[in-house]
């Protein structure tokens, strides 16, 4: 079921600011699209997301539930963002390692990028295509991600490098992989896994955002 606002087709339960543009019919209930944001036809966005001023979500991009997309974030075709991810102001994804204005590449030539559940990307992070950012990873402001990021890794710099580990609540872990919130972790593959039986994601429910 879709509604209509001045000729613009809106999915049921989706708020679009009068100066926002949502052309996609695959946007979940409770999602808010703010001024000058543009959600292109063919983009998929889940429920209860916040798409702030000036953000752009392209055809072929997939965004999960309860994702925060802050101002001026650019999400292009081939990018998948899982649930409860935070994308800070000005985060930019890419999808073509060798762009040329004179060469138009099809979708099969683009490199996919995946951001796993609960990850945080700080302001002005740039993600070079073809990588996976692990669950609950934390990418510091201004970092350039050029390689896969393990679960719970804390990454900063250009190029981005792992400088420590973070809890699902967002706090840095100490040298014994413990958090002040009480959670404990151990190494698991390239990343971390919780060892205390507490839920690893959604540790601290974020206050609902009502405006951009």
Image (tube, rainbow, N blue to C red):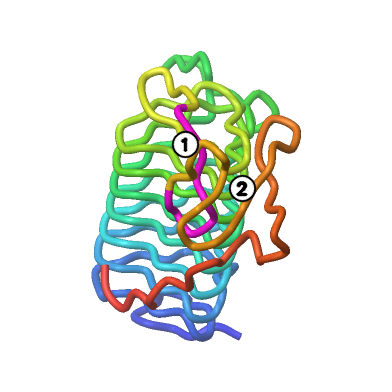
What quarter of the picture does the C terminus occupy? bottom left
Q: Is residue 71 above or below residue 133?
A: below
Residue 45 falls left or right of residue 102: right
Q: Is residue 13 above or below residue 117?
A: below
For the point 35% across and 44% down, the residue is 122
Q: Nearer the viewer, residue 55 or 207?
A: 207
Reading the image, the residue beneath label 2 is 135
Q: Residue at x 65, y 33 (%)?
A: 107
The vertical placement of 35 against 56, above or below, is below
> Residue 201, percent across and down?
60, 61
> Is 39 part of what is drawn in magenta?
no
Q: Is residue 31 left or right of residue 27?
A: left
- Helix, strand or loop for the magenta stretch, by majority: loop
Mark number for residue 27?
A: none
Over which residues does the magenta segment extend?
Answer: 163-171
Q: Position of residue 138 (x, y in %)?
A: 46, 43
Q: How many numbered tags mark residues here? A: 2
The part of the image, by quadrant, that contains residue 28 is bottom right
Label 2: which secondary element: loop
């Amino acid at each position: 079921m879709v509604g209509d606002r001045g000729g613009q087709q809106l999915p049921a339960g989706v708020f679009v600011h009068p100066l926002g543009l949502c052309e996609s019919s695959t946007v979940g209930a409770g999602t808010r699209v703010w001024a000058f944001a543009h959600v292109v036809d063919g983009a998929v966005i889940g429920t209860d997301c916040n798409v702030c001023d000036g953000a752009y979500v392209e055809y072929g991009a997939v965004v999960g539930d309860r994702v925060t997309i802050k101002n001026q974030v650019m999400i292009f075709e081939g990018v998948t963002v899982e649930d409860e991810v935070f994308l800070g102001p000005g985060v930019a994804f890419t999808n073509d390692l060798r762009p040329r204005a004179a060469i138009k590449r099809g979708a099969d030539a683009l490199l996919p990028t995946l951001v796993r559940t609960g990850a945080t990307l700080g302001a002005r992070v740039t993600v070079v295509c073809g990588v996976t950012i692990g669950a609950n990873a934390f990418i510091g402001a201004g970092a350039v991600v050029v390689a896969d990021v393990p679960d719970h890794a804390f990454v900063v710099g250009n190029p981005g490098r792992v400088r420590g580990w973070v809890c699902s609540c967002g706090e840095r872990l100490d040298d014994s992989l413990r958090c002040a919130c009480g959670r404990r972790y151990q190494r698991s593959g390239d990343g971390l896994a919780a060892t205390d039986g507490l839920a690893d994601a959604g540790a601290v429910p974020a206050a609902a955002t009502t405006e951009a």
